Amino acid sequence: MLLRVRATSFLAGVALAGAVAYFQLRQDLLQSQQVLIDQASKFNCEELEKRVADIESSLADLKKQQ
């Protein structure tokens, strides 16, 4: 009888620890995903702005040559 109570308590503790670990891991993954999305959008915007500025300067140079 005592072994059954101990085993049940152990399994309940393992289940609770697993649920907490799953929740924490899920939150960490969601935060990491958001950080990556923010970095990617920042990089793409900066790169796009640089390319547009280069094109505009090239266009201004062409207009000056004419």
Image (cartoon, rainbow, N blue to C red):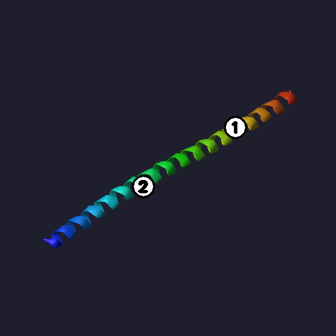
Residue 59 falls in which quadrant of the image? Answer: top right
Work out how far the residue at label 2 is from the one at label 1, CA to CA, in angstroms.
38 Å
Residue occupied by mark 1? 49
Residue at (54, 45) in percent of width and height: 37
Amino acid, disc 1: Glu
Disc ID at residue 24: 2
Foreground residue, 61 or 42?
42
Residue at (76, 32) in percent of width and height: 56
Residue 42 falls in which quadrant of the image? Answer: top right
Amino acid, disc 2: Gln
Q: Is residue 36 above or below residue 58?
A: below
Q: Position of residue 55 (x, y in %)?
A: 74, 35
SS state under label 2: helix
Answer with left or right where residue 35 lies relative to residue 64.
left
Q: Earlier in the sequence, mark 2 or mark 1?
A: 2
For the N terminus, the image quarter is bottom left
Answer with left or right where residue 54 lies relative to residue 16.
right
Q: Position of residue 5 (x, y in %)?
A: 18, 67
Disc ID at residue 40: none
For the C terminus, the image quarter is top right
SS state under label 1: helix
Q: Position of residue 4 (x, y in %)?
A: 16, 69
Q: Is residue 53 above or below residue 36?
A: above
